[in-house]
Amino acid sequence: MIAGVLVGAAAGSLANSLWGPDDLGLQTFVRWVSRPIGQIFLRLLFVLVLPVVFSALALGVAGVGDLRRVGRMGLRTLVYTLVVSAIAVFIGIGLVNLLRPGEGLPADVRARLLEGAATRAETITRPAKAPRTGADFLVGIVPDNLVRAAAENDMLAVMFVALCFGIALVRVQTSGTKALRAALEGVYDISMHCIEAVIRLAPIGVAALLFTVTAELGMAVLLQLARYVGVVVLALALHQFVVYSLAVRFLGGMSPWTFFRGIQAAMVTAFSTASSNATLPTALRVAEENLHLPSTVSRFVLTIGSTANQNGTALFEGVTVLFLAQFYGVDLSFAQQTMVVCICILGGVGTAGVPAGSLPVIAMILGMVRVPVEGIGLVLGVDRFLDMCRTTLNVSGDLAAAVVVARGETRLHGARSENLPAEPDVVRHQR
């Protein structure tokens, strides 16, 4: 992807400086070569949105197990996840609204960028209609026709049905529901394989998308990208070292210094693999050996958290959508920003814990708020680095949640003091 963004941006900028955006030959190349290649890449992402979100969210809820047996621990984990994910999204959206990284383009450059962008976006995805009132918003979450909701790109309604399916899979234990769960796992596995194949084509798609943008706008667009990366990293750092420190100290009864020393191995693994799922074995080990958490709690919370507790992903999605809205000059109302927040929180639950797993959700949200989806090409070039950063936040959040839930469980059961996650000696991890 880095090679793709460098080649695409350099070639597009060179073409812009040599021939100018109004050159007939350059316009022909963009129209018939670079833009179609980029749109095909985006369409490959869009076609996987529905199966990925539905199967991942349903299986994530079903993975809780017997709700009657672990209902209390599951409820505590769910409430903590939703609250902390909401805080993450508000931090990201607050910084974007405060720092305005997407603004600053000259009026003529923005006008050229917006020319025909809405039409091109319409051909890629059909934007969902924004609700008129808060009541309409709540009613619209519950669909009257799942097929129509999926066809109209109403992903909140699809996520609601997926949540209901996940709960039903836990409560109804029959041969039919076991077969349905196996089928959903098959859909999930196939979707992940397809996404992996699409991401392998990303250098070509990114190069085409960046060539199209820079050939039309020149290098001015790249300055906006640097500001965007700075805002994302700042938001992730605030959530990592402020929110999680407060959570483990006041809700988990553990020193933040002890916590971050104990999870070093998991943080390094998460950063290098950019995958919460791949980091799960390391996270389980440090939770039990370094943080001395009860195995029943750590295994439950971390297994669910690797898919359902994606705070960094939720934050990244919110920042990216608002940045691109500012970049394209699309003014999002308070109701639209509220809708983005809700989708990002649910998207953090339903997004796959694999590299680039949030990209299809971002593309879907852009279509819903009528931001040209071609803009996703701007962020794909730096997504690998940002993916590594937000995965580190996701894994740290899973371990913080395990600390918080473990304290509540040990207090309720009157566990011995040595099982409480308070100030344990950190075991030196293997290199």
Image (spheres, grey):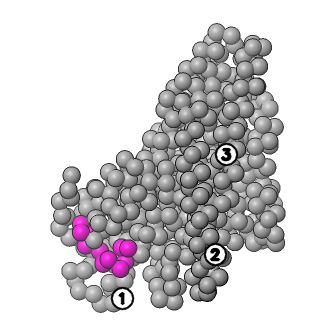
Residue highlighted by disc 3 = 44
Residue highlighted by disc 1 = 412
Element type at mark 2:
helix
Q: Which residues are magenta?
A: 289-299
Residue 117 visible to an observer of this rendering:
yes
Magenta stretch: residue 293 in it?
Answer: yes
Marks 2 and 3, Cα distance to the nearest angstrom?
A: 26 Å
- Residue 1: x percent and y percent? 51, 35
Indicate which disc, 1 or 2, sits on the residue closer to the N terminus: 2
Indicate which disc, 2 or 3, sits on the residue closer to the N terminus: 3
Residue drawn 19% across and 64% down? 426
Element type at mark 3:
helix
Residue drawn 20% across and 56% down? 430
The one of 388 and 134 positioned closer to us in this rendering:
388
Pick out the residue farthest to the top.
Answer: 18
Residue 333 visible to an observer of this rendering:
no
Badge 3 amino acid: Leu
- Residue 128: x percent and y percent? 78, 55
Q: Nearer the viewer, mark 3 or mark 1?
A: 3
Mark seen at residue 180: 2
Marks 3 and 1, Cα distance to the nearest angstrom?
A: 49 Å
